[in-house]
Image (spheres, grey):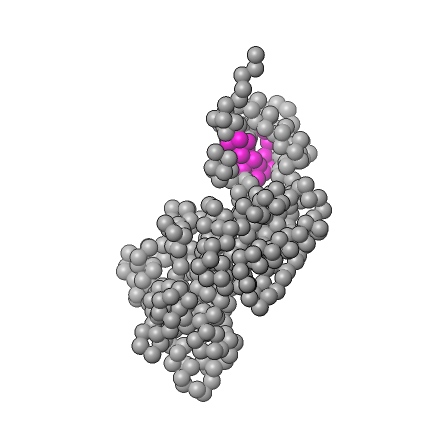
């Protein structure tokens, strides 16, 4: 009589497979012998797992290489060119999507532009329209491994719910459940700045850092906090909402979309300039350096506010790196950025002065970051075990 496999043994089997797959992804080309050594699994277990992955065409074998002892070792790599993911960027005035393989080569694009999202149903309809168009461009839809969504708003990534969709206020929008039900694919949702932080910590200018802050000055102001290599989201997913740091008073006290007043985002973001000064970023940039001293005065106040806010943030959280980015910073990269970098040492305690400040001029495309979210979940053993437990 065959004993049924228990849930715990199934989970162990899944965990072992994810461990092996993660090693192939992160350290490949790698042989079966090396996989056994690095994973701590038996040679037979590794062989069984690799055979399943080969059968599913998730990994592939290379040409056998000479080995100092024994048989030639066959290198294994992820079959990245034949695995696909869809990345979606959800913004207030557009929904943009792209189809990539796991080499991050873009194979298709789709976009829907709008004046304003009407409600949650409208947003979901547009997202589905973009996904449907991308599915038609997929070389093999059966090889799609997931859909990632980068959202400009508060996100409960565990539940796949956007708590504050762009332009819709405090109206929660569930994305994971309806999209998984419609497409039969895993769906992952994350805030855009959190995604940027995860990407740069894994592959970019924050690699090697374990405690850092990402600040994005763009249409709004967003932040992400990494502590001991873990993304900190807070009890209600608002950790890192740096744009609501109280920075202005008196005649500069404007009401913020959050319901409070004096937030940094009211003047130090593109949306704040539009709402409170009736100006585009380009117009504000031009006027700041014109002969009209009133705009230069506003710029000086913004500069002081950013300087003090970032200095306090470094003092409170004691990061080893702070990365700033976004179109607002890029517009003033010759003035605001150098001033910020030069003034920080005098604004923080000596114990915090070893912080490294980075200006990221060119951000990866949001759709690419969203694809990276799918790839991260597929190859991260901890995430996969948690998802299947």
Q: Quadrant of residue 336?
A: bottom left
Judged left or right of residue 63, residue 7 is: left
Res 203 visible? no
Q: Is residue 27 magenta?
A: yes
Whole-percent x, y for residue 288 in the image: 45, 80
Q: Indicate the position of residue 330 as horizontal and vertical percent values.
A: 49, 69
Verify whether residue 268 appears in magenta. Answer: no
How would you classify the magenta stretch by its main secondary structure?
helix
Quarter of the rendering containing residue 68? top right
Which residue ends up furthest to the bottom in the rendered image? 291
State which region is magenta. 14-32
**Residue 153 image offset from top left, x and y in percent:** 47, 58
Residue visible at 44% across and 78% down in the picture: 277
Q: Which residue is depicted at the point 56% across and 15% down?
A: 2
In this view of the protein, can residue 355 be seen by the observer? yes
Could you say which is closer to the camera, residue 14 or residue 157?
Answer: 157
| The N terminus - image quarter | top right
Residue 224 x/y as whole percent: 42, 55
Side of 46 where 139 appears, left or right: right
Q: Nearer the viewer, residue 71 or 137?
A: 137
Q: Is residue 89 above or below residue 229?
A: below
- Which of the pair 252/24 is nearer the observer? 252
Residue in the image at 50% along x and 54% along y: 173
Report the residue at 45% width, 87% height from top: 291
Q: How many marks?
A: 0
184, 61: nearer the viewer: 184
């Amino acid at each position: 009589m065959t004993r049924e496999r228990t849930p715990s043994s199934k989970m162990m089997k899944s965990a072992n497979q994810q461990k092996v797959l993660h090693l192939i992804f992160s350290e490949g080309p790698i042989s079966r012998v090396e996989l056994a050594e690095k994973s701590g699994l038996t040679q037979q277990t590794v062989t069984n797992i690799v055979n399943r992955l080969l059968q599913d065409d998730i990994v592939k074998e290379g040409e056998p290489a000479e080995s100092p002892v024994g048989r030639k070792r066959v290198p294994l790599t992820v079959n990245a060119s034949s695995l696909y993911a869809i990345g979606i960027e959800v913004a207030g005035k557009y929904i943009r999507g792209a189809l990539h393989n796991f080499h991050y080569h873009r194979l298709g694009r789709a976009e829907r532009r709008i004046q304003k999202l009407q409600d949650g149903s409208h947003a979901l309809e547009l997202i589905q329209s973009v996904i449907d168009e991308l599915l038609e461009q997929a070389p093999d839809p059966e090889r799609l491994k997931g859909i990632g969504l980068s959202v400009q708003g508060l996100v409960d990534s565990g539940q796949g719910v956007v708590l504050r969709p762009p332009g819709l206020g405090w109206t929660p929008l569930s994305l994971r459940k309806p999209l998984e039900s419609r497409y039969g694919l895993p769906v992952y949702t994350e805030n855009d700045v959190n995604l940027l932080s995860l990407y740069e910590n894994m592959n970019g200018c924050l690699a090697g850092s374990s405690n850092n802050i990402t600040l994005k000055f763009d249409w709004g102001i967003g932040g992400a906090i990494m502590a001991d290599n873990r993304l900190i989201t807070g009890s209600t997913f608002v950790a890192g909402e740096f744009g609501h740091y109280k920075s202005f008073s008196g005649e500069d006290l404007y009401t913020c979309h959050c319901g409070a007043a004096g937030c940094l985002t009211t003047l130090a973001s593109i949306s704040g300039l539009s709402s409170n000064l009736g100006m585009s970023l380009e117009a504000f940039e031009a006027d700041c350096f014109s002969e009209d001293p009133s705009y230069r005065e506003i710029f000086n106040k913004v500069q002081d506010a950013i300087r003090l806010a970032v200095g306090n943030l470094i003092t409170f959280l004691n990061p080893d790196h702070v990365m700033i980015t976004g179109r607002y910073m890029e517009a003033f990269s010759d003035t605001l950025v150098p001033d910020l970098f030069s003034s920080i040492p005098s604004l923080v305690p000596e114990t915090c002065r070893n912080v490294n400040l980075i200006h990221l001029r060119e951000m990866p495309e949001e759709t690419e970051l969203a694809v990276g979210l799918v790839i991260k979940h597929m190859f991260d053993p901890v995430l996969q075990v948690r998802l299947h437990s």
